[in-house]
């Protein structure tokens, strides 16, 4: 049974150093929680694959195309109006509204894709039970790490975290 | 619980004027005013704006019951304050989005202190501007005819109509600005959730924070989303305000039918938007005592952008004059002469003073770093930009091709009600907003403080 620990650090540097040390010792850093994005920290975790931007592009273009189709169909077939002999399919001005609506659709798609990729909304999470974790959104830096299956680890994870400057190390149940 | 944060001149950094500023200190400083009692200044401000809100409501009811004859519009000058106010307000909104998105994309770190006002300002300004095209309709009750919906008349909207473009532009832009503002707020809502002590506040902020934990994965995707939204906001805003410009340029009127109108309107939006942001920054900085994170350097940077805007506006005006002369069209030349010497000439000269001449004072660093002077300048710029919008309408419509139709606009009490009332509504919404959410982005200020080495 591999245990999972949540360690609280005072600065992003300590969190970063601990993350590297934990990985070198054969344990598995699962996640880190910080009050602001720490650029260096992202390199310490495997990259996140997501189709956020592709989803935005596809949805935006699809909605824009559908909107143009609606204009074209209504103006050419369903309700043609001859205004001084202008072409029924007045494409230059028909581009305006689809552009606006397409960008809006892309933005909404982006938010939905973001929520899906982050598994949000999730109003309650087991980590919220850990005392002091509320400071992850204020001024503390947390590392969540799983202890290596016995035999591989050279140091006990709890001692390692404490030796790297963790203020509090708490064991959490499987999330 | 409050931590005294006096700005210290010895601070090493440019954008944060208090050292050392801890993460907890930043959170307290920005989130504190939301949880503390409102304070005397806030209540006085609310009491000052409340009559304007009521005035606007009365004016709206009067207009909807009496019809647009309540305004000074006549059969020649069919557009009046409603369209000028619409353009003015949506310009301020567009300016807000342009500011926050362009500054995100160009990685201007100082933006952190002004982003949030700029985005909230956009939201309220666009919401107010959206009212005007509806109420300027002869029959406002039927405004929904602009939407394509299955109807018993079997008709469709006229997609070639500028009114329909406006409908989609405002609608898309309003919802987009809500989304953009909300995404920017998300990590701060989580901070508010974790800082709140009352159960009701915890639940309220908790629901809107969606369970944000600030994990590496969250931040990584969040940054990707925020930057992408900023990147698509720029073309959106440019196109929205170009559509506003096309409302005029797609007509056949002298002085309106000009290809420079869309970019000229976009620059005007940037110019008046920055003026409004600077005004609000000065007020919020004073009201919430945020001198430590909104420094003189912020005002300096914004003033430089306003100066650039002023130069580009002057260039646009000059292009108008030049093309009227160079084009050789009699109606265009006569219109320019009417602008400088006709019935509204005093207003036109005032416009040139406010938008072109006065901002040249911003070449001097001493003025860029003097908050009261800047406050006065941006106030006059906002007046000048409003004059520009109303004069675009009045001059062209008063001095059309047909001399027998030349008339002037006589303002009524209800015209002025729709100018001053919404200003109070805007201020009222903004006051409520800063009581509900942090007025400055907390997480970005933390990152800025960290990157500037003030930990």
Image (cartoon, helix red, strand yellow):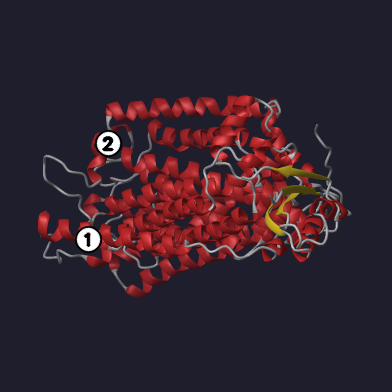
- Quarter of the image for residue A94 reads bottom left
Residues A2 and A33: in front is: A2
Comparing B373 with B326, the one in front is B373
Is the residue marked by circle 1 packed among few (<14), some (14-19), or many (20+) residues within 10 Å? some
Foreground pick, B301 / B148:
B148
> On what subunit does the disc labeled 1 rest?
A
Q: Is residue B118 above or below residue A76?
A: above
- In terms of secondary structure, where does tag 2 sit? helix
Residue at coordinates 25% horizontally, 34% vertically from top-left? Answer: B141
**On the picture, is B36 further left or further right than B402?**
right
Taking the image as drawn, is residue B1 in sight?
yes
As drawn, B323 above or below B192: below
Residue B251 seen in this snapshot: no
Rate crowding at label 2 as few (under 14), some (14 to 19) or many (20 or more) other CA atoms within 10 Å: some
Residue at the extreme front of the image, as rendered: A151
Using the image, tell me which numbered label, if any, was put on residue B422: none
Q: Whole-percent x and y of residue B4? A: 84, 38
Residue B310, image x and y in percent?
A: 56, 61
Secondary element at image label 1: helix
Report the side of B258 relative to A133 (left or right). left
Task: Please tell me which residue is depicted at 56% across the width and 51% down the height of the picture.
Answer: B381
- Residue B261 position in % (x across, y down): 39, 63
Tags 1 and 2 in contact by the CB under 8 Å rule?
no
Q: Which residue is mark 1?
A: A69
Q: Is residue B318 left or right of B366 when viewed as pictured?
A: left
Q: Which residue is mark 2?
A: B140
Q: Is residue B399 above or below residue B312?
A: above
- In three-dimensional space, the C-alpha distance between marks 1 and 2, rounded to whole angstroms, equals 28 Å
Q: Of the residues tagged 1 and 2, which is closer to the observer?
A: 1
What subunit carries mark 2?
B
């Amino acid at each position: 049974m591999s245990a999972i620990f949540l360690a609280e650090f005072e600065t992003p540097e300590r969190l970063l150093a601990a993350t590297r040390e934990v990985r070198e010792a054969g344990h598995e850093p699962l996640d880190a929680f910080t009050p602001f994005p720490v650029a260096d920290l992202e390199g310490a975790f495997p990259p996140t694959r997501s189709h956020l931007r592709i989803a935005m592009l596809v949805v935006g273009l699809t909605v824009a195309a559908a909107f143009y189709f609606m204009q074209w169909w209504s103006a050419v077939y369903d309700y043609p109006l001859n205004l001084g002999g202008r072409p029924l399919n007045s494409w230059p001005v028909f581009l305006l509204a689809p552009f606006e609506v397409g960008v809006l659709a892309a933005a909404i798609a982006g938010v939905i894709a973001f929520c899906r990729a982050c598994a949000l909304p999730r109003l309650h999470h087991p980590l919220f039970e850990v005392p002091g974790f509320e400071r992850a959104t204020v001024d503390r830096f947390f590392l969540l790490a799983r202890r290596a299956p016995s035999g591989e680890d050279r140091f006990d994870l709890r001692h390692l975290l404490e030796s790297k400057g963790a203020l509090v190390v708490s064991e959490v149940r499987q999330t | 619980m409050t931590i005294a944060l006096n700005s210290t001149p010895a601070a090493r950094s440019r954008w944060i004027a208090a050292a050392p500023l801890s993460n907890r200190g930043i959170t307290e400083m920005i989130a504190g005013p939301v949880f503390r009692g409102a304070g005397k200044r806030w209540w006085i401000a609310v009491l000052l704006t409340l009559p304007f809100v009521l005035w606007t409501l009365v004016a709206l009811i009067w207009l909807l019951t009496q019809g647009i004859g309540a305004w000074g519009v006549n059969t020649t000058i069919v557009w009046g304050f409603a369209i000028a106010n619409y353009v003015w307000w949506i310009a301020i909104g567009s300016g807000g989005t342009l500011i926050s998105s362009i500054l995100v994309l160009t990685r201007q770190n100082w933006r952190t202190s002004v982003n949030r006002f700029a985005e909230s300002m956009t939201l309220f300004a666009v919401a107010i501007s959206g009212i005007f095209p509806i109420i300027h309709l002869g029959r406002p009750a039927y405004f929904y005819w602009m939407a394509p919906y299955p109807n018993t008349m079997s008709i469709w909207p006229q997609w070639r109509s500028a009114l329909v473009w406006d409908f989609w532009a405002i609608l898309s832009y309003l919802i987009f600005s809500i989304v953009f503002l909300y995404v920017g707020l998300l990590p701060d809502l989580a901070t508010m959730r974790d800082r709140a002590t009352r159960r009701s506040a915890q639940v309220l902020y908790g629901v809107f924070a969606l369970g944000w934990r600030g994990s590496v994965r969250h931040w990584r995707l969040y940054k990707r989303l925020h930057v992408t939204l900023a990147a698509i906001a720029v073309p959106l805003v440019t196109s929205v305000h170009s559509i506003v410009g096309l409302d005029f340029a797609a007509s056949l009127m002298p002085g309106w039918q000009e290809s420079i109108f869309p970019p000229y309107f976009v620059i005007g939006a940037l110019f008046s938007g920055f003026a409004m942001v600077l005004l609000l920054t000065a007020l919020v900085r004073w009201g919430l005592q945020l001198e430590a994170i909104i420094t003189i350097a912020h005002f300096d940077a914004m003033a430089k952008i306003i100066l650039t805007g002023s130069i580009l506006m002057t260039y646009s005006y000059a292009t108008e004059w030049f093309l009227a002369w160079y084009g050789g069209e009699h109606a265009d030349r006569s219109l320019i002469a009417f602008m400088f010497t006709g019935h509204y000439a005093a207003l036109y000269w005032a416009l040139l003073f406010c938008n072109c001449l006065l901002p040249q004072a911003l070449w001097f660093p001493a003025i860029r770093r003097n908050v009261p002077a800047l406050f006065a300048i941006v106030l006059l710029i906002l007046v000048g930009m409003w004059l520009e919008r109303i004069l675009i309408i009045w001059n062209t419509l008063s001095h059309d091709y047909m001399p027998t139709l030349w008339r002037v606009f006589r303002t009524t009490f209800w015209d002025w009600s729709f100018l001053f009332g919404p200003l109070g509504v805007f201020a009222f919404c903004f006051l409520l907003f800063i009581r509900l959410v942090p007025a400055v982005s907390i997480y970005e200020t933390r990152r800025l403080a960290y990157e500037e080495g003030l930990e």
